[in-house]
Image (spheres, rainbow, N blue to C red):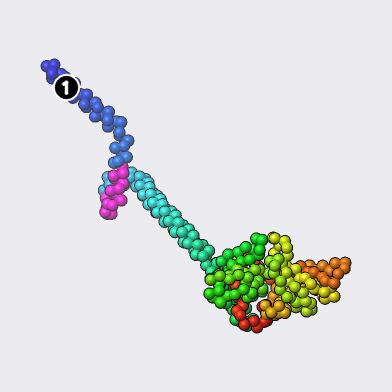
Amino acid sequence: MLAAAQGRLGGGNRERRVIAFFRKHVISFLAVAVATVCVASLYAPTGPTGPVGRLIAWAASPFQKATVYVFDGATSLWTSYVALIDAHEEADDLRTINSLLAQKLAELVPLEEENARLRRLLEFKTRVPNRYLPARIVATDILGQFHQVTINLGADDGARSGLPVVSDAGVIGRIVETYGWTSKVMLMIDPNSSIDAVVRRTGAQGIIQGTNARYDLACQFAFSLRTEEVKEGDVVVTSGLDQMFPPGLTLGRVTQVSKGDYGIFQEARVAPAVDFASLREVLVIAPGGAGGGAP
């Protein structure tokens, strides 16, 4: 009897636990049931229904609308998310393409600048007929004790000491040392440089020399008679009297004139026509090729 009583007691406990479980989760069961009805009604075939069906449809209508709203919202959210991911990927691709284009542009700019310089040299060769040997600067010492550059044209290529070196802008200097495949060029701004010159406007004669200042990239127009007319802005060119540079090559422009209180000479400061800091390509006037002309 004790065992039977314990069995009945255990059975009652199980019933109470089941009832308690259903009471605790009644809201969840109702929600699942309503959702099931709503989903079923979405896909149920249309047609005449009885009073019970209409009642169920009426009761489920708000939940059905809510379900459709939630589904539509979820679909829209997912679509927006996918579109956002695509937009981010497209933006990354565009940034990559933009970076590559910028890199290509940076590579093309020096090439275009070099092409422009070479075109100017070609025009200069046409405008000033001489026999030229093209060369490229491989080393510079513009601000050193001696204002010189090294070019990749040497004795093996026909270069020799004393040959004039020019660019499309005007006179650069002359070769002072030659090696197998390179040569040293003394610039016109070097203190040891001396070029016979003339003022294009008036014909006033003088000598273009480098200054003694180490970091001075200008020249002086020396040994010009005080009686000669020279003024700021005048263009100074080679005279050809030194039998080294052909006549008419541009040397620079007068920036200052000093006559002094006495003496027979006047001096003028001349800014070179060539920008020595940006020199890359040059032309060496070959032996026997001097023809002259204004650059």
Relative image position of residue 98 (x, y in whole percent): 49, 61
Q: Residue at x 19, y 23 (%)?
A: 10
| Residue 77 in view in this figure | yes
Task: Specify the farthest residue to the right.
Answer: 261
Question: Where does the C terminus fall, quadrant-wise?
Answer: bottom right
- In the rendered image, residue 61, in percent from the top left (x then y), is placed at 35, 47
Q: Amino acid at mark 1?
A: Arg
On screen, residue 159 above or below 100: below
In the image: residue 237, left or right of residue 76: right
At 62% from the left and 73% from the top, the residue drawn is 161
For the N terminus, which image quadrant?
top left
The residue positioned farthest toward the top in the image shown: 2
- Residue under numbered circle 1: 8
At x 72% / y 61%, what residue is drawn? 213
Tell me residue 248's x, y (percent): 70, 79
Compared across the picture, whether 238 is left or right of 49 comes to right
Residue closer to the observer: 245 or 259: 245
Residue bounds of the magenta highlight: 34-49
Whether residue 249 is in magenta: the answer is no
Position of residue 78 measured from the top left corner of the image (x, y, whole percent): 39, 51
> Which quadrant of the view contains residue 126?
bottom right
